[in-house]
Image (spheres, rainbow, N blue to C red):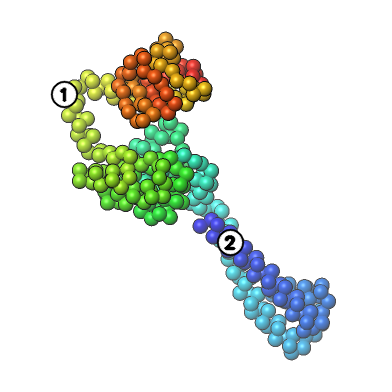
Amino acid sequence: MYNWGRSKIYIALILMITVIVIGVLGFRFFSDYSWVDALYMTVITMSTVGFGEVQPLDDNAKLFTVFLITISVTIFAYAVSVITEYIVSKSDPKRVQYRKTQKMIHQIENHTIIIGYGRNGRQAAIKLLAYDKPFVIVEKEDEVIEKYQNEKLFFLKGNATEDEVLIEAGIRNASCLICTLPEDADNLFIVLSSRQINKDLKIISRASQDTSYKKIRLAGADNVIMPDRIGGDHMASLVVVPDLIEFLDNLSIVGKRSINIEEISFEDMFEDQKERTILNINMRSRTGCTIIGYKSPDGEYVVNPEANTVLKPGSKIVVLGRPEQINLLNKEFGI
């Protein structure tokens, strides 16, 4: 939208210059004017100010003047409308936000694309904001965009089932895509298209029906979440093991200042890339945090790993601690 507005201004300027050149050459040829007089006659003819001729015109020069007035008035009117439209668009809040979003998309890499801004999309955005993770929201409903758009949320209006919209959202440079649409068919189509465009993209999709789960996974989703199943399971767990669930709920991450659980990659902790055991890094004594999980470079998960577990490049650890202990860990290891 914005580039097209600029291109129309360039076209209008080129047309104006072309008419001026034609006018100068025409008056020079038909009336034998000097270059200055020819330029003067062209300008007053195009602007229709009504000044008199430098010298009387013969019939050929008059016919040329009629021709010049006809095309110049048309082109001049077009140029004025284009320039006016451009000036108005510069102050239009919607277009200003659109340009801001486009500028942000072109500048960032490894961002997250959220498809749809319903209940699940909003929760995903809140979590990403809490972690200062860059993201773009693709939403097709004008009412939703107008209601929630602000300086922290970048909306791109469009239908995510179209590849052009995904590309405009920067999917080639994105690290993750979260698809939260209510219709499983739409999620399936978007997952399939996204995987074709970016093979390395991490894709997380919502599913409403059990029959859709496997299909969305086969289409290329790394994770498929069923909110209704999770919600029902959580409520039942509050009956079966209420204290345990309440404890886990208290571990929920709201923002960086209230983190209880943190995932840390080997590369974030150690720049020398040398292997170490959990015992060697002495995490508990140095920070107060406890390592409760380990993910090997091959993707194998170990819960409550032993002290002799070897941390290797490409691996990750999951640590548990109070917010002040997590902050000390980040300071201790320069994360």
**Horizontal and vertical percent position of residue 93:** 50, 50
Residue at 64% across, 79% down:
70
Q: Residue furthest top?
A: 285
Is disc 2 surrounded by few (<14), some (14 to 19) or many (20+) residues within 10 Å?
Answer: few
Is 54 left, or right, of 242 in this rendering? right
Residue at x 40%, y 26% (from the top left corner): 315
Question: Where does the image place residue 268, in percent across and percent down from the top left?
Answer: 47, 25
Q: Label 2: which residue?
A: 7
Amino acid identity at mark 2: Ser
Mark found first going from the N terminus, 1 or 2: 2
Q: Is residue 17 visible?
A: yes
Is residue 70 rendered to the left or right of residue 155? right
Measured as percent of width and height from the top left, residue 317 is found at 38, 23
Residue behind mark 1: 240
Q: Marks 1/2: CA distance? A: 65 Å
Foreground residue among 132 and 150: 132
Mark 2 falls on what kind of element? helix
Q: In the image shown, does 271 or 332 lie closer to the viewer?
A: 271
Q: Residue 280, relative to residue 76: is it above or below?
A: above
Q: Is residue 144 above or below residue 255?
A: below
Quarter of the figure with residue 54: bottom right
Residue at 60 percent of width and 70 percent of height: 77
Q: Are marks 1 and 2 in contact (CB under 8 Å)?
A: no
Q: Residue at x 46, y 51 (%)?
A: 168
> Residue 66 occupies which quadrant of the picture?
bottom right
Answer left or right for 168 relative to 246: right
Q: 48 or 149: nearer the eye?
A: 149
Local packing at callout 1 (Cα closer than 10 Å; few below 14, some 14-19, many 20+) is few
Where does residue 102 sit, x and y in percent of width and height? 51, 49
Extreme residue in the right direction = 34
